[in-house]
Image (tube, rainbow, N blue to C red):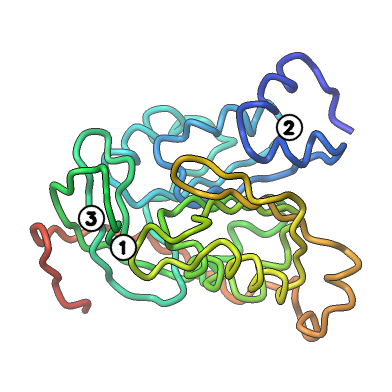
């Protein structure tokens, strides 16, 4: 077990994956989808993560992420978006620091949308070789949670710990409510390990893979721990102006 130093305990209270370390588990390598400027990364490292992969499709946020961690050999920053299908989608960019940007339209958004940039979206399992051996997955993608999770395919079952930020009641058009996300993950061999914590803008179900459930689930037949691809790509944005969309080629 990783020593619970004062630094460790302080980090544990700053990130939601601390839910697992409080129970006595150690997290290993962390994959964070929707990492924004990497605010949580230093805490993952303090909790004992050996490697962190951070996905962020927003250009402003990615530049800040790269400035903070681009020279840290423990952190791999990727300027790309993940989803269920390989496609181009418009990312609606918010004013200021870009936090709150989403591929979906928010019902009553407090943010001002100032631009729309087409982003290439890929499935996570098309680049699964880069996260082989990772045990912790964090997803914070402004309403696209289920879409992103489905893109992991069979490789999702390689994770032990999931922390998914999603809305108890959808706040984006096309967003799946937290209960639907939890039900889908249950079918993939994960069990809910905490209540849905009510916050101002979302519910936060923390889920942990149950070894017993995973081993007995009929969906694990075949090669649930294997990789489905090793192609490595980086999606770059194509600016089209607010509200417009260019055809994917």
- Residue 124 drawn above or below residue 87: above
Q: Looking at the picture, tell me which residue is in the foreground, 1 or 196.
A: 196
Q: CA distance from mark 2 to mark 3?
A: 35 Å
Label of residue 177 in the image:
none
Mark 3 element type = strand
Identify the residue at horizontal 10%, vertical 67% (top origin): 244
Label of residue 48 in the image:
2
In this rendering, would 91 be left or right of 176?
Answer: left
Instruction: Name the residue that disc number 1 marks.
Output: 104
How many numbered discs? Answer: 3
Q: Position of residue 210 (x, y in %)?
A: 84, 62
Q: Tell me which numbered mark, 1 or 2, is placed earlier along the sequence.
A: 2
Q: CA distance from mark 1 to mark 2?
A: 34 Å
Identify the residue at horizontal 40%, vertical 41% (top origin): 36
Q: Tell me which numbered mark, 3 or 1, is placed earlier along the sequence.
A: 3
Given contact means CB atoms under 8 Å apart, are the residues at marks 3 and 1 in contact? yes
Instruction: Name the residue that disc number 3 marks.
Output: 92
Identify the residue at horizontal 23%, vertical 64% (top origin): 90
- Tag 2: Cα neighbours inside 10 Å, few (<14), some, or many (≥20)? some
Q: Position of residue 23 (x, y in %)?
A: 85, 38
What is the quadrant of residue 154 in the picture?
A: bottom right
- Residue 193 drawn above or below residue 41: below
- Residue 48 drawn above or below residue 29: above
Which quarter of the figure is the C terminus placed in?
A: bottom left
Mark 1 element type = loop
- Tag 1: Cα neighbours inside 10 Å, few (<14), some, or many (≥20)? some
């Amino acid at each position: 077990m990783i020593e619970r130093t004062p630094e460790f305990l302080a980090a544990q209270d700053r990130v939601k994956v601390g839910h697992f370390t409080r129970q006595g588990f150690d997290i290993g390598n962390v994959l964070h989808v929707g990492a924004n400027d990497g605010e949580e990364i230093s805490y993952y490292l303090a909790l004992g993560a050996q490697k962190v992969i951070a996905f962020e499709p927003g250009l402003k946020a990615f530049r800040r992420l790269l400035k903070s961690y681009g020279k840290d050999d423990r952190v791999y920053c990727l300027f790309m978006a993940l989803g269920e299908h390989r496609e181009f989608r418009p990312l609606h960019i918010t004013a200021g620091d870009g936090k709150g940007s989403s591929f979906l339209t928010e019902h009553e958004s407090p943010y001002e949308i100032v631009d729309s940039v087409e982003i290439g979206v890929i499935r996570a399992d098309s680049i699964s070789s880069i996260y082989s051996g990772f045990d912790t997955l964090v997803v914070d993608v402004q309403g696209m949670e289920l879409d992103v999770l489905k893109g992991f395919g069979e490789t999702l079952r390689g994770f032990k710990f999931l922390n998914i930020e999603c809305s108890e009641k959808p706040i984006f058009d096309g967003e799946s409510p937290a209960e639907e996300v939890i039900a889908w993950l249950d079918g993939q061999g994960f069990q809910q390990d905490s209540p849905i914590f009510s916050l101002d803008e979302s519910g936060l179900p923390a889920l942990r893979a149950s070894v017993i459930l995973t081993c007995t689930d009929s969906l694990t037949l075949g090669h649930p721990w294997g990789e489905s691809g090793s192609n490595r790509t980086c999606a770059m944005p194509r600016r089209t102006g607010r509200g417009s969309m260019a055809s994917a080629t």
